[in-house]
């Protein structure tokens, strides 16, 4: 059986040269934190400070898979998304939430 995971990757841009900085700034409006949520393709988000970035992705994995395996997949996807800009990164960390284990509490209706 497969479960759905939401994985958040966080990292920092590093050693940005003028060309890399220009590439990131040219696309910054498409990569706003408020505009990019979790998706199956993954979404890279950052702001004009070009310091930190996040990558949100939805992954499906066997229940037997560990969170570590899911996080490793997300880290690889995030690295690829940042590398497409031709820039370096560091300090990437990932955290996964198994959405099939989250219990939704519905408000009680009066009445």
Image: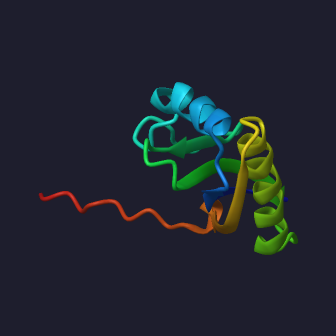
- Above/below status of 75 relative to 81: below
Residue 45 drawn above or below residue 94: above
Q: Which quarter of the rendering shows the N terminus?
A: bottom right
Front-lying residue, 47 or 42 = 47
Q: Residue at x 45, y 38 (%)?
A: 32
* Residue 72 percent location from the top left of the image: 82, 64
| Whole-percent x, y for residue 84 in the image | 77, 35
Residue farthest along the front direction in this orientation: 18
Q: Is 23 on the left or on the right of 111, as rendered? A: right
Task: Say above or below: 29 vs 62.
Answer: above
Horizontal side of residue 3 vs 43, given as left or right: right
Which colour assignment does the render follow?
A: rainbow
Give the total of numbered labels.
0
Q: Residue 85's x, y, as percent?
A: 71, 36
92 or 41, nearer to the observer: 92
Q: Nearer the viewer, residue 42 or 78?
A: 78
Question: Is residue 2 among what the camera can see?
Answer: no
Would you say residue 15 is visible in this rendering? yes
Q: Residue at x 66, y 38 (%)?
A: 20
**Quadrant placement of the C terminus:** bottom left
Residue that sits furthest to the left in the current view: 111
């Amino acid at each position: 059986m497969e479960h759905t995971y939401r994985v958040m990757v966080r990292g920092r841009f590093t050693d940005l040269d003028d060309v890399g900085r220009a590439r990131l700034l040219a696309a910054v409006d498409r990569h706003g934190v408020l505009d990019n949520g979790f998706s199956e393709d993954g979404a890279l988000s950052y702001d004009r400070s070009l310091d930190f970035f996040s990558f949100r992705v939805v992954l499906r994995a066997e229940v037997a898979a560990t969170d570590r395996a899911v996080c490793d997949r997300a880290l690889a996807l995030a690295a690829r998304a940042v590398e497409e800009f031709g820039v370096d990164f560091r300090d990437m960390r990932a955290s996964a939430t198994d959405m099939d284990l989250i219990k939704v509490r519905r408000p009680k209706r009066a009445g």
